[in-house]
Amino acid sequence: MYRLILLVFIQMLFPIDYNQHDVSSNNKNIKFSNSYNDLSDEIILENTIDLDDYIVGPGDVFLFNMISSDGMHNFELEISPLGDVLIPNVGVIYLDQLLLSEAFNKIKLECSKKYSNVKINLTLNKIKKFKVQMIGPIQNSGFFIANPFTTVLSLYNEMIDNDDNKENISIRNIKIYREDKIILVDLLKYSMTGDKEYNPYVKRGDIIEFSIKDRFVFISGGVKTEGNIEYVENENLFDLIHLVGGLSEDADSNYINITSYLDNINKINMTINNISDTKDYILKPNDYINVRKIKEYRRTDFINIDGEVNFPGKYVFDNNMSIGDVINLAGGLTKKADSDMISITNQLINGNPDYELERILLIDPSDRTSSEKSYIKSRKKIIKGLIVSEDKDLTKLIYDYKIEKGDEIFIPLKLNFIEIIGAVKFPGRYPYNPEFSISDYIKESGGKTKNANGKIFVIDNMSNQKTKARLNKSLNNGDILFVEQKEDFDPFTRFKDVMLILGQAAALYAVINTTK
């Protein structure tokens, strides 16, 4: 009886509002419990509870069923803050820190001492909650309510996931202070391996310490994830490689280079020639690891063909292929293709620097030679690496050229017209006639107007180059014939310009006479 009165008195000592953080449920929002003994939140279990693994303590509630000669007795037994339960007619039984199986056996044993021919049925009905403490450079440090199935990761997700300093908080060097032990927690390793050793369940009285990331190792090359990885003491290189997802397919596992600092200034280089030997290398802060890649490993280069072929697209590059071979791979030319024309560009070649052009551009324009000026003009007229043909014989010859990496082939549509613009009577589109010269096309368009200045240019359909035309030359499909016209003449504007010049000359003459 005195023990029962003492239990009631102890319960009254605890205030009903501790306003402590509650992360014992699976709700992702931060909760505040009215009491650290609040058991109202639902707990979702990963697995059924193991009788030989679960440790009981204050807050655990058992369903108790006893069948004896006196009848059936049903009770709800809650372990008190003192760690015991009170069973009427049996007494107080101390259970704190026992395994669940041990607790059940002890209850049955004590009941059998009071009752003969008794049958006891027990099950765990409600799970306890308890306080743990989180410390370190985090916004929500303090005491939190957890349960036996709260992990360090769940605490992290609840309390640190929205922390303004989250990116700097370590997830690999978390410490749990439990009685006289320090337990190391590595959430990154847990996420990669699923090993619960690195993400343990918390226990009553735990102090969980978070820290700032301050030491790293760097890994690059033939691994699936490159970058800075937080350093952990006594970790070997083999585990680190596994931590970043393992080696990539193109990794050379027989060549792993390590640069390591001997002190704050001096460093050494070493090479590991067998992946199994990485288990023997213990990492140090600021180590730089590079796993060599096999450069030509399953390398596939492509060439592209577009325009009037039956199956345009990308095709795998082969050193032995010709341009004609690629056209055949693409199903040959369509009926609408201009078989006399072809253009080939190459972005790899076009991307190479033109050092001669760069040199000339550094020279003041007034100091450039005629050759240098000509080079600039010539380079601007054509794309670097371009092959273009509008001649039947040249196109046939180009078909035999070896293909180069990065080539992009274009077969144009056959255009049966040319365009005439500028100082002709009837500018516009005209049917292409291979027998016509430039002079014939000008006649076809009604001849030159009085506004023509005598200059005639051809803009090439394939290369877009503008060249001076000769009247006896022919055009190609799609070419543009440009008959240049004089600038618009405005008599009034010309009169104003003349008067302005005369006025300036008269003023200059007056100044000269005055100074004599």
Image (cartoon, rainbow, N blue to C red):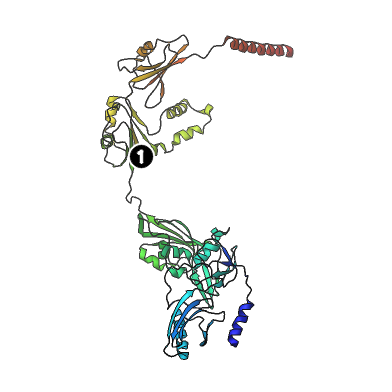
Which of 41 and 418 lies nearest the eye of the viewer? 41
User: Residue 287: where, in percent of width, then height?
Assistant: 47, 61
Q: Secondary structure at mark 1?
A: loop
Could you tell me which quadrant the N terminus lies in?
Answer: bottom right
Residue drawn at x 46%, y 33% as measured from the top left? 357
Horizontal side of 305 relative to 96 (left or right) equals left
Q: Is residue 116 above or below residue 333?
A: below
Q: Is residue 360 above or below residue 460?
A: below
Which of 424 and 236 lies nearest the eye of the viewer? 424
Q: Is residue 418 among what the camera can see?
A: yes
User: Residue 62: where, in percent of width, then height?
Assistant: 48, 78
Residue drawn at x 38%, y 27% as measured from the top left? 463
Residue 20, image quadrant: bottom right
Report crowding for label 1: few under 14, some 14 to 19, many 20 or more residues within 10 A (C-alpha).
Answer: some
Q: Is residue 372 above or below residue 256?
A: above
User: Residue 479: where, in percent of width, then height?
Assistant: 37, 21
Could you tell me which quadrant the C terminus lies in?
Answer: top right
Q: Is residue 213 among what the camera can see?
A: no
Horizontal side of 451 relative to 416 (left or right) equals right
User: Residue 430: where, in percent of width, then height?
Assistant: 36, 16
> How many marks are shown on the rendered structure?
1
Which of 378 and 220 lies nearest the eye of the viewer? 220
Residue drawn at x 54%, y 66% as measured from the top left? 23
Q: Could you tell me the amino acid type at mark 1? A: Gly
Q: Which residue is mark 1?
A: 406
Residue 51, image quadrant: bottom left
